Image: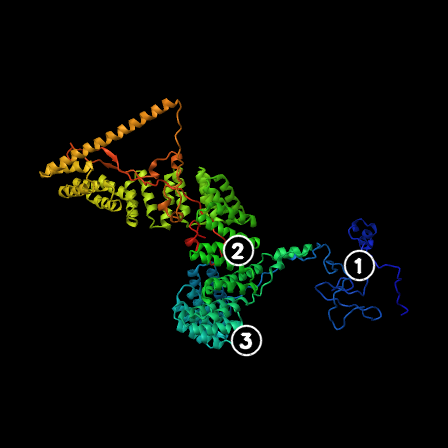
Amino acid sequence: MENVHLVPEEEEDDLYTGYNDYNPTFDSEDLHNDVGFQQAVRTSHGRRPPMTAKYPGTAIGGRPIGTAYGSRIPVGTAMGRPMTGAVQDGAARPMTAVRAAGYSSSIARGSVFDPLGQAKGPAPPLEKQNEDTPEEKIKILEKKVNDLIEESCLAHARGDLQLSLEKAKEAGRKERALVRQREQTGTADHINLDLTYSVLFNLANQYANNDMYTEALNTYQVIVKNKMFNNAGRLKVNMANIYFKQKNYTKAIKFYRMALDQISNAHNAMRIKIMQNIGVVFIHMGQYSDAITSFEYIMSESPNIKTGFNLILCYYAIGDRERMKKAFQKLICVPLDIDDEDKYIPANDDSHANMVIEAIKNDKLHQMERERKALAEKYIMTSAKLIAPAIESSFAAGFDWCVDMVKGSQYVELANDLEINKAITYLRQRDFKQAVETLKMFEKKDSRVKSAAATNLSFLYFLEKDYDQADRYAELAMSADRYNPAALINKGNTVFVKEDYEKAAEFYKEALRNDSSCTEALYNLGLTYKRLGRLEEALDCFLKLHAILRNSAQVMYQLANLYEMLEDPHQAIEWLMQLTSVTPTDAQVLAKLGDLYDNEGDKSQAFQYYYESYRYFPSNISVIEWLGAYYIDTQFCEKAIQYFERATLIQPTQVKWQLMVASCYRRSGNYQKALETYKDIHRKFPENVECLRFLVRLCTDMGLKEVQDYATKLKKVEKMKEIREQRVRSGRESSARGRREGSAGSGSSSSPINTPPLRASVSRSEAKYSPVLQQGRDSGQSNHGTSAKSERLSVKLKTLPGSNEPYEASTQQEIDASYVDPLGPQMQRPKTAARKRTEEDEFADEELGDDLLPE
């Protein structure tokens, strides 16, 4: 202890003391400028002979010389004492740190400084392995097999099932070649069983993925029957799945049970899944009692949402009310094992915690939790809607029971959705009064539910054409939730029907800002621009909508109609051709294609599409008229007869179709048939002058006695027609004279009374998409200089010969024989926004959502 010196407490220990100290003795950079050192080098001290012939000496005779490559040899002193640190018996002395790195006294004088040994050149190349040995060949072949299995799995992940199967087959061939090679080299005991199992298992999977079930079953049998593969019995589950796809339910049950017997209780999750598969197979077989046994066992051991839902379906199938109630209670009590949403809400000002919450808010785990919760809510809602009419005397009482049960569970927020579904069920039953009353109950609920109920009420009132109430509830829905796109669309629709298109467009744009994927808003915005005459902007809207709804017939029709209004018939034809690929049997689309080709002068293509349109819908007068005129122009009058006879059946009060039939008989040379037709027309229309003229001509040329009678009738009809025309003319003249006298007497002109034009409304059937109804509507062609062919089809037919003309040589005078729709063009109503919909509520598109685009 006397040699121990303690540091005084007042002195502080500096950890970095001595790092900056420098001993100038070790400075070797300025040695060439050191005169003393240079003088010593030039003297005999630097050129002293070595002590021995083997080792170069130093100034100290007893110091051994060593390098990194050789050992140090100790040299004895004069007294025979060995050097300090020397190792006896010729052992190598360990390296020390006395010498500077890179310096050695054994290096010849004049050599360059090379501490890394770079002057020796590159290291010699590694010795190549001999690939000709059997073991190396086997290793290379095994690697190829593994690579093929991996390529097969990657191809399947990309969806290239054919390539994955080819790679699996090639891996099988390589593996068999590997086994043969091991047998030839006598190393059959070292066969890689894991590799063989992987090859067979992957091959069986790829067979099953390519629907080659027989080959897959055979491959699985090879694995299962081989006792050398451990746990191969589990693959019987895969075999049972294949039998299920083949609808061989008996064998599927058998193999599921065999797999269940070979799986121990330690793997309880696997056993539960197999039991669930067994229950599903029993449902497909109609054996609900056996399925119930499996599902009840699962719900007692490890309850889950899918099994609970399947159990309710089985009870519903057998009509057991009480057990349906119990199963529903079990279903809503199944734990989801997910975190509460409050976990993802920042609760304090801790920036670090807020950053963590922001990072995990949309991670994969949270997405999985949301999906699991949404799936559970879907099953619960579907179960409630399914059993509500069955568990009580009325569906309203059943819904009330389900709502009470849900309110006491972890899914309390679903109670309001069930109430809305109750209103929807009333709508299905056409009980609109009860539906409205149920929805009005939500006016005092929280904002989200109030907005959903008000949206539905606005939707209903709009369908009933009570636009004031629709507007009121749309405002209520917007005030409850301004970001509700359906409420904004309903508000825009109520403004649209008042023809305030600019304001309607603003509401549709706001709905799109809140939900860019709202297809109803985009569709209605396109219709609004169309009404405003902003065709390019409307075209842009429908092109965007087509990118979202690739197979929407409504969107394609609107695009074709817009291109027609923009006087681009080729683009219109192209879009209509795409539309025919979606709705190939739509007669009006085919007729529109025929009309466009007719305008372009392509009669053959026009005839093809008009004929197809007639084949699918043989009651379209405009199509019938065009086809009849086409056959008359091509001198096939006999074929035109059947079309005009069809027009006669459709419009029996129109005499022109019957005159066309008689004219076709006359042109084809069948005068007797033409005479009979004219007589029949005369009986139905005795005052028709044209019919009497032809009867007189035919009877005269055929030498019939009835000619005098028809001539007398003709004169009488012409005289009556003359008198009638005179009366009409005199009446007009007297009324005009009275107006002139009245204006002269009063000294001022009275303004005529303007009768407001009637606005054609759209019926429910017209609100759905049908090109038959939408063609010609809202086209705006009168404002864009297009012809009247969008509103009526003008077909020029050859006129009937006059009374002084022979019927063999008709003149080429033309009359307008077109049929004009007496209702005229009708208004096209915008799409009505859907109410808040649940995932199972798909009936609205057909039952109520006449104007909804498909989702």
The spot of residue 340 in percent (x, y) is: 60, 61
- At label 3, counting other C-alpha atoms closer than 10 Å, the crowd grade (few under 14, some 14-19, many 20 or more) is few
Asked if residue 228 can be seen in this view, the reply is: no
The quarter holding residue 224 reads bottom left
- At label 2, counting other C-alpha atoms closer than 10 Å, the crowd grade (few under 14, some 14-19, many 20 or more) is few
Asked if residue 450 can be seen in this view, the reply is: yes
Between the C-alphas of marks 3 and 1, the distance is: 87 Å
- At label 1, counting other C-alpha atoms closer than 10 Å, the crowd grade (few under 14, some 14-19, many 20 or more) is few
Which tag is nearer the camera, tag 3 or tag 2? Answer: 2
Q: Is residue 769 left or right of residue 294?
A: left
The numbered disc on residue 266 is 3
Q: Is residue 343 left or right of residue 562?
A: right
The numbered disc on residue 441 is 2
Give the SS element for disc 2. helix
Q: Is residue 657 left or right of residue 292?
A: left
Give the SS element for disc 3. loop
First-in-chain label (3 vs 2): 3
The spot of residue 492 in percent (x, y) is: 49, 44
The numbered disc on residue 796 is none
Between the C-alphas of marks 1 and 2, the distance is: 118 Å
Q: Closer to the camera, 414 or 196? A: 414
In the displayed structure, 190 sits above or below 703; it is below
Give the SS element for disc 1. loop
The spot of residue 111 in percent (x, y) is: 71, 55
Q: Amino acid at mark 2?
A: Met
Between the C-alphas of marks 3 and 2, the distance is: 53 Å
Which quadrant does the N terminus fall into?
bottom right
Residue pointed to by mark 1: 48
Q: Amino acid at mark 3?
A: Ala
Q: Amino acid at mark 1?
A: Arg
Q: Closer to the camera, 616 or 77? A: 616
